[in-house]
Structure formats: C-alpha cells, structure tokens
Amino acid sequence: MKTARLVWALFGLILLDLAAGSSLYAQSVTKKTIEAGNSKVQVNVMGVSAEIVSVKPYIKAKDGKKGNLWLDVVVKNTGAEPQAYSVFGQGKTMSGGWIGGSLKAPETGKLDPGKETVARLNTRYKADAVPKEIRVDVLPPE
C-alpha cells in the first residue's frame, strides 16, 4: 500500500512539473498583428528574446506569371546576449491551406543585442497577388 502511494505521489509531481513547464513556455510566446498593405500578418515570437519590427510581403514574378511570395522580416534582438533565430513564414491559400518556407536569421553567426537584421524569406506560396492573411513565427534555431 505504501508503494502505491509513493508511485501516485511521484506521478502527481511529474504531472505538476509538466504543467508548470508548459505554462512557462506559453508565457514566452508574444503575439501581435501587423498591417502590411492589404495583408494582415499574424506574428508569433516563441521561446526567444526578439521583436518583429516590420514585415514586407511581395510577389516576385516574371512576365505576368505567378510568382513566389517573399517576406522581408525585420528581426530585432531584445535579449542581453547574441542570438540566432529560425524565421518561418506562410501565406493562406484560397482553399484555406497554408504554404510557406523558413530560414535562419542572421544567415551566419548571431545577432548582437539591440541590433536588427532583415530575413528575406522565399516561400513556396505561388500566386499573382499577395495573400490577405500571412503568418510569421520566430523560434530558436534548429
């Protein structure tokens, strides 16, 4: 009987620890919406000290054909130490799906505290116009 109580007590502590860890992670998520032309950009910064200063979406196309969605994302390091980031961007399709791409910012090394860098993100989203809804996520580098 004492063994069963000990097992349940340990199980309870593990669950409590997992719940506390997930709430800590949830607290480190910053969300905001940026207006960029006719598009609404939902920005999520998760698990890093950073701020998205601006997002500029545009389509690069040749001779009136459909082109890829590009996102120029300005990332600012708001932390006390140099950091690198993974930037992930997506455009919402007419059918309701999301198509995107990702890259590391800055491309080499780390961004010093208080400095900004521009992440030029090429997505797999193909169209002749910028989508109305865009998502940008900034995460720790892989």
Image: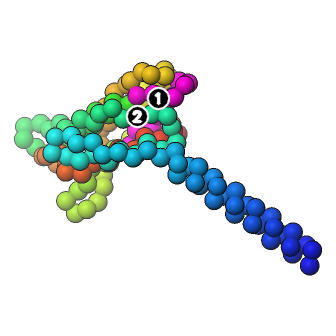
Instruction: Assess disc 2: are there few (<14), some (14-19) or many (≥20) residues with their C-alpha within 10 Å of its C-alpha.
Output: many
- The image shows residue 91 at horizontal and vertical percentages of 27, 50
Measured in 3D between alpha carbons, the distance from the residue under mark 1 to the one under mark 2, in whole angstroms, is 7 Å
Which mark identifies residue 130?
none
Magenta part of the protein: which range? 76-88
- The image shows residue 105 at horizontal and vertical percentages of 42, 30
Where disc 2 sits, the SS reads: strand
Which circle's residue, 1 or 2, is located before the other in the chain? 2
Where disc 1 sits, the SS reads: loop
Residue closest to the far bottom? 1
Q: Quadrant of residue 44?
A: top left
18 falls in the magenta region:
no
Q: Which residue is mark 1?
A: 78
Question: Could you tell me which residue is drawn at 7 percent across and 41 percent down?
Answer: 64
95 vs 121: above or below: below
Tell me if label 1 and label 2 are in contact, CB under 8 Å.
yes
Question: Could you tell me which residue is drawn at 20 percent across and 46 percent down?
Answer: 39
* Residue 110 in sight: yes
Q: Amino acid at mark 1?
A: Thr
Which residue is more in the foreground, 42 or 99?
42
Q: Quadrant of residue 8?
A: bottom right
Apparent side of residue 116 relative to residue 49 in the rendered image (left or right): left
Tell me the colour scheme of the image. Answer: rainbow
Q: Amino acid at mark 2?
A: Glu
Q: Quadrant of residue 2?
A: bottom right
82 falls in the magenta region:
yes
2 vs 79: above or below: below
Q: Which residue is mark 2?
A: 51
- The image shows residue 133 at horizontal and vertical percentages of 24, 51
